[in-house]
Amino acid sequence: MSQAKGTDNKASEANGANGVTESTANQAVQQPDHAHAPAPTSSLKLIATLGLIALLSGLLVVSVVEATRSAIAENHRIALERAVFEVLPGAVNRVDFIVSEDGLAPVRGSEESTTDPKAQRIHAGYDADGALVGVALSGSGRGYEDVIRVLYGFDPQRERIIGMTILSSRETPGLGDRIESDERFLASFRDLAAALADDGEGLAHTIRTVAPGAAAAPGEIDGITGATVSAEAVGRIVNHSAQQWVPRIVPHRDDLQIDLEEVLQAAPADDEDDEDDEDEADGGVTGTPVIEGER
Amino acid sequence: MAAGQQQQPITMDTFLVGLWRENPVFVMLLGMCPVLAVTNSVANALAMGLATTFVLLCSTGMVSILRSVIPKEVRIAAYIVIIATFVTVVDYLIQAISLEIYNALGAFIQLIVVNCMILGRAEAFASRNRLSRTMVNSLGMGIGFTIALLCLGSVRELLGSGELLGYPVFGAAFEPWVIMLLPPGGFFVLGGWLLLFAWIKERQQQRAVRQRTEEAGHDVR
């Protein structure tokens, strides 16, 4: 190998034009043992070159990450926003709530930094008259190919699921990805029983996907022919998530009946929320209570 | 040899070679992984083609600038670091431009790093040519790659979902060939295009041979 390189270097030396630095550097090393294989470039130079390239690369990557951070956060926020209004039909305003042991508390801008990291956030949607439409909850789990993340709307008064959308999935195009578009499958989620069990632990009925057209009992979803695994995965994900969320939300559902005007006024100006949206990358959380009229 | 090439002027051929004679997909069959994986729609194919072209241009440009500084022993490592840097840049830029495209392309943006077409260009061309010549050649290669992706993407989207760029083309009666969107469809369509190009090439050659023999016949007479 080094033999070959030696001749290579010689060739470029002979031709003169290419790699001036390199050939002059090598010339000095090569001169003494002309007959034998010439010494390779010194390790120090190799390390220095690679180190320099890596350093420049690092600098470039860091500056691009910094430059695009706010735009990416904004994209995630818009995507979540759209999804929240999609699963809460009729909602025009959104307020985030913190779920804790003592109940639900609306997020006001100033509380942003002081919140307990373990506290989880849900997004409540209100219609034009200020009446509660429902809360948007998220869940995720294994699909056929990769993790599927879903967002679904839950109406705590009627204890029913009122809408579902897929936030991200990599299901097979044309087959599994019909969980995002199959009309009958999605329609099952527009009015799906998710009542709290009498003992207050979990749901009264398990939510599960059954054969297409066979949904009859409460909590049953119409499956999709050709997308059995994906459709069942979505049922399982929603069930798993609802089993945990519903017992925490339904007992405190009165906390969601807030005076919308007051909370919205307490919200700070919207323009500062680019800064504090870091945790959005893993899916689901946004900054200040967002007041968005248009969809 | 390196010195000889350095004197070579930039000709139209420097640019066109990537589009036709050395087309990275249809002639050299390089970088097949993204070619088959993301070409299930025109939009994905276009996004992947542009992302790859960007990475190709930036990294071969950089390799060309640094070609006299990089020692031969570590050149591959250096090329890969450079390519990986620009892939990361493109990854963030696409996230900032559109999350939908980002989700559709999935892991294949990161996998541009191992697209052997880019490493091949860096090694075979950029490391031996001056910046301007390298850029012209890389642009041609990038466009050739994008066109090839579009060739596959349009056929697969048309047959697989009856749409083109998301707009329905056939009536409601059209039953989509789902297989075209799945990996086997990628191989079928690629095979079809390769067959077409091989046939065109063969015809060109035959015509050239026939012309030559006819001319020769004239001379004899």
Image (spheres, rainbow, N blue to C red):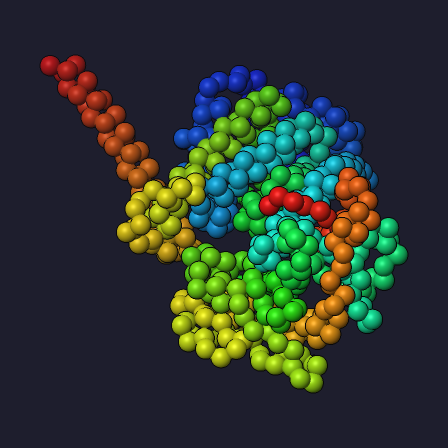
Q: Is residue B11 above or below residue A241?
A: above
- In the figure, is residue B113 to the left or right of A265? left
Foreground residue, B73 or A226? A226
Q: Is residue A247 above or below residue B74?
A: below
Q: Is residue B214 above or below residue A66?
A: above
Foreground residue, A225 or A1? A225
| Quadrant of the rendered image containing residue B125 | top right
Q: Is residue A4 above or below residue B133?
A: below
Q: Is residue B170 visible?
A: yes
Foreground residue, A100 or A224? A100
User: Residue B111, image x and y in percent?
Assistant: 59, 48
Instruction: Residue at 70%, 72% (x, y): give it.
Output: A250
Q: On the rendered image, what quadrant is the N terminus of chain B found in?
A: top right
Q: On the rendered image, what quadrant is the C terminus of chain B found in?
A: top left
Foreground residue, A192 or A263? A263
Instruction: Residue at 65%, 69% (x, y): give it.
Output: A157
User: Residue A292, image x and y in percent?
Assistant: 67, 45
Q: Residue furthest right?
A: A114
- In the figure, is residue A212 to the left or right of B60? left
| Quadrant of the rendered image containing residue A183 | bottom left
Q: How many marks?
A: 0
User: Residue B131, image x and y in percent?
Assistant: 62, 23
- In the figure, is residue B59 to the left or right of B213? right
Instruction: Residue at 63%, 29% (x, y): give it.
Output: B61
Q: Residue furthest front?
A: A129
Q: Is residue A34 visible?
A: no
Q: Residue furthest bottom?
A: A199
User: Residue A212, image x and y in percent?
Assistant: 41, 71
Instruction: Residue at 45%, 70% (x, y): give it.
Output: A223
